[in-house]
Image (spheres, grey):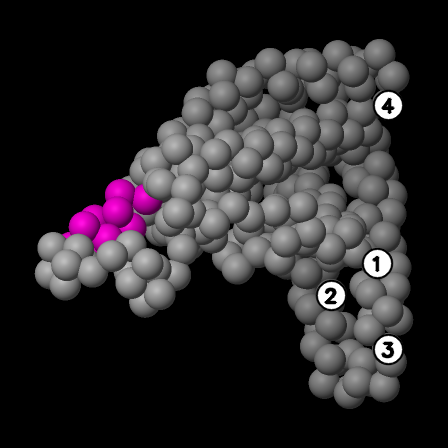
Amino acid sequence: MKKFTDLLLFEINRIKKAYLMLIGLIVSLQIVANIWASNNFMRMYKNHVKETRGSMNDFLENWGKFDFFQVQNHFIFELSIMLGIFALVLYVFVIWYRDWIGKNNLSYRFLTLPGSRMNIFYAKLACILFLIGGLLATQIVMLYLGEMLTGILLPDEMFETLRFLGQPAKNEVIGFILPSRILDFVLHYTVGIAILVAVNLMIVLRLSFKWKGFAMGIAVIGIFLALFIAVSLSGWLDYIFPIEKLALTLLFSVLVTVGSLLASHYLMNNKISV
């Protein structure tokens, strides 16, 4: 346990500066999107008054009140989220390859540490999950702070307050990373963790068997895709209830996670080398 904890803290310390910079960039972009979208709405209102000499009520009857969903749909807001996703996906590979490629001798030091080598795998996996959790927490906070900022930028008569807890997101990206229903949240992140563990297995295969391992990883992915396509085309899923589809998806994700961990355990302790 101590080896795992030490390795996890080591991984977090290596990425903390870049991670905090990423969070700062995401927060800054979302603030810019908030100010931009709010100012655009105010500009529309001022143009309406200038051109038609109408009242605020006339403007709101035509355009409706401004809400934070309009900020979420701004391209800069969406860019900030996609930036975070891209950075984490990239780091899933960087966290392994920077220790095994080039003149870096950290891979040798890791492998010669006392205890199970699987602690290396668990530490890197836990680090990625920690980074994901941090970005999700940041995004939740920014949804509330962003709405508060919008309320400051616009008159109360123009702004409609939302309740984010349980509120279905109109933005597809937000709806995917922060589903409004608990079951959807569990489903998305159970499948996501299964994919993450499987990708880490593919990387360990590549490091263990070089290009042969890469081919093996592609073959495994091909088998899973073939099974998925075969089940989808069979029409069998049309005859079961949605809750049963959910249960099967969760079961399949758990099996993929457990299978990937068992395979990774074998590779880490028997096959992987510098």
The C terminus, quarter of image: top right
Tell me which numbered mark, 4 or 1, is placed earlier along the sequence: 4
Q: Of the numbered discs in the image, which one, if any, rests on residue 106?
A: none
Q: In which quarter of the image is residue 268?
A: top right
Q: For the residue labelled by badge 2, is the local secondary structure a helix, a strand or a loop?
A: helix
Q: Residue 241 carries which label?
A: 3
Q: Which amino acid does label 2 sit on?
A: Phe
Q: Which amino acid does label 3 sit on?
A: Phe
Q: In this view, does 104 lie above or below 118?
A: above
Q: Residue 224 carries which label?
A: 2
The crowd level at tag 3 (other Cα within 10 Å; few <14, some 14-19, many 20+) is few
Vertical order, 154 against 130 (above or below): below
- Kindly identify the residue that appears in the image at 29 percent across and 63 percent down: 58
Q: How far apart are marks 3 and 2 (CA)?
A: 23 Å
Mark 1 or mark 2, earlier in chain: 2
CB within 8 Å, label 3 to label 4: no
Nearer to the camera, 233 or 26? 26
Q: How far apart are marks 3 and 4 (CA)?
A: 43 Å
Residue 213 visible here: no
